[in-house]
Image (tube, rainbow, N blue to C red):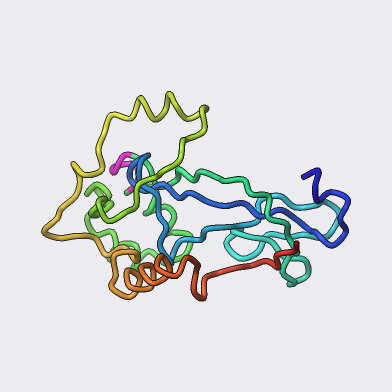
Amino acid sequence: MEKYDARDDVDGLLFHYNHLWGSYSRVHRGHNWYDREIRVIKNGRNVRSWKDAQSFRINGRKLRVGDCGARIYHYGWVRHPEVMRKKTIVMDGFYHDDEWIAKKHSDSGKPWDYGPLENIPLLRETHPAVMRSRIESKDWQAEDYSNPDNPPDHEHLQLWCRVHSALERLIGRKIGGYSNWILVK
């Protein structure tokens, strides 16, 4: 923040993301998961949240941002499968009508299935110290709630996404990924 504070050409800061999935040891790196996003903005510039409040814009214009190099650990997808099922039903209710919800979640008592976790890369970093006790107190395994004979239809398991993600890993960068900012040097 100190580095970019005096620069008028910078509207905010870009952070890198670890999206944990089903376990504190698995992190999404697939094409359909954003790897960076704006999480600090300068006040007094008419900055407003953009779309699903994922990012920000100024009068429709993308923000000019500096890459702060810091990493955010997103734990929103590491929950007991029964809790995760309830969360997804509520979240889907923000975007879909009751009929869609009833069809998608016809067995609303069934625990969430994270799918085959062995397909999700291992986290190779250390969690923030503040998370230590929460991680140590986890008393469930997502794998115990998985049905290998009937895997879920998560986007990252679909062939197009697996191929796209593998190609990105091979070349070392996102191809056509979402970026709602203009990176400044």
* Pick the front one: 7 or 21: 7
User: In the image, is residue 130 part of the stretch drawn in magenta?
Assistant: no
Q: Main secondary structure of the magenta part?
A: helix
Instruction: Give coordinates of residue 138: x percent, y percent.
Output: 33, 30
Q: Residue at x 72, y 65 (%)?
A: 57
Compared across the picture, whether 71 is left or right of 184 comes to left
In front of the other: 140 or 86: 140
In screen coordinates, is 176 left or right of 98?
Answer: right
Location of residue 173 in the rendering, given as x and y in whole percent from the top left corner:
50, 67
- Residue reaching furthest front? 171
Q: Nearer the viewer, residue 60 or 110?
A: 60
Task: Identify which residue is drawn at 66% across, 51% down.
Answer: 39
Q: For the N terminus, which image quadrant?
A: top right
User: Tag count in the figure?
Assistant: 0
Up-down relation of residue 114 to residue 61 (above or below): above
Identify the residue at image location x=73%, y=60%: 65
With respect to residue 105, does 125 lie above or below?
Answer: above
Please check the rendered image and state whether residue 83 is part of the magenta-colored stretch, yes or no: yes
Q: Is residue 56 above or below residue 127?
A: below
Which residue is more in the foreground, 127 or 57? 127
Residue 54: % across, % down: 59, 59
Magenta region: which residues?
80-84
Give the quarter of the image for residue 30.
bottom left
Q: Residue at x 33, y 75 (%)?
A: 160
Going by the image, does 170 lie left or right of 39?
A: left
